[in-house]
Amino acid sequence: MIPPIVLPKTNVSEATSILETWMNKPVVLWVVLGEGSVADTAVAKSEELINSTDPDDNPYHLARVVHAPDPSLILEKLKSLRVNPRLREPIEWNNLTKYIILSISVNTDTIGAIVLKSKFPNQPRGYINRILRKALAVDAV
């Protein structure tokens, strides 16, 4: 079983260091932002998908869930990444609480997809599946 990576809530350098360590591994990072029931659901649904099949034929074996309870601790690192120009709207860096999930392609240091917190709770598992597959596809390019 692949558990989520939980970043510290109070230490900027430690949170950034853990994120950077994972950005140097051959995985797609699925960063869940914030705390509360929506974040807990996002972590649980994402972890369930990543662990849903035999690791040998699991399309998600190259994805890891990173839970950032306090996204402000990694804000500078996130801002240093490229942003997929195909996103429907620019990321509002001063309002990160608007988002629940960011996918990061470590091959290109790019934020490839974002999921709005307001839209997430009503989405079926297939929605996460589609977004995660899209993130994996971006990373494979």
Image (cartoon, rainbow, N blue to C red):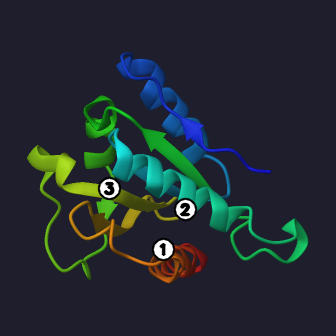
Per the image, the residue denoted by label 3 is 100
Horizontal arrangement in the rendering, residue 63 relative to residue 98 (left or right):
right
- The quarter in which the C terminus is drawn is bottom right
Horizontal arrangement in the rendering, residue 59 relative to residue 85 (left or right):
right
| Residue nearest the viewer, comparing 25 with 133 | 133
Q: Which residue is drawn at 45% across and 78% down?
A: 124
**Crowding near pointer 1: few (<14 within 10 Å), some, many (20+)?**
some
Q: Can you say whether 92 is above or below 138 in the image?
A: above
| Residue nearest the viewer, comparing 92 with 109 | 92
User: Considering only order in the chain, which callout, 3 or 1, is on the residue closer to the N terminus?
Assistant: 3
Horizontal arrangement in the rendering, residue 51 relative to residue 7 (left or right):
right
Q: Which of marks 2 and 1 is in front?
A: 2
Q: Which residue is drawn at 56% across and 80% down?
A: 133
Per the image, the residue denoted by label 1 is 128
Q: Is residue 127 visible?
A: yes
Q: Which amino acid does label 1 sit on?
A: Ile
Q: Which amino acid does label 3 sit on?
A: Ile
Q: Where is residue 131 in the image (x, y as percent from the top left)?
A: 45, 77
Q: Are marks 2 and 1 in contact (CB under 8 Å)?
A: yes
| Residue nearest the viewer, comparing 93 with 110 | 93
Q: In which quarter of the image is residue 116?
A: bottom left
Q: What residue type is labelled 2?
A: Lys
User: Considering only order in the chain, which callout, 3 or 2, is on the residue closer to the N terminus?
Assistant: 2
Q: Which residue is drawn at 25% across and 60% down?
A: 117
Marks 2 and 3 sit apart, C-alpha to C-alpha, by 13 Å
Q: Nearer the viewer, mark 2 or mark 3?
A: 2
Q: Is residue 63 visible?
A: no
Marks 2 and 1 sit apart, C-alpha to C-alpha, by 8 Å
> Residue 45 shows which numbered tag?
2
User: Considering only order in the chain, which callout, 1 or 2, is on the residue closer to the N terminus?
Assistant: 2
Q: Residue at x 24, y 77 (%)?
A: 87
Q: Where is residue 48 in the image (x, y as percent from the top left)?
A: 65, 62
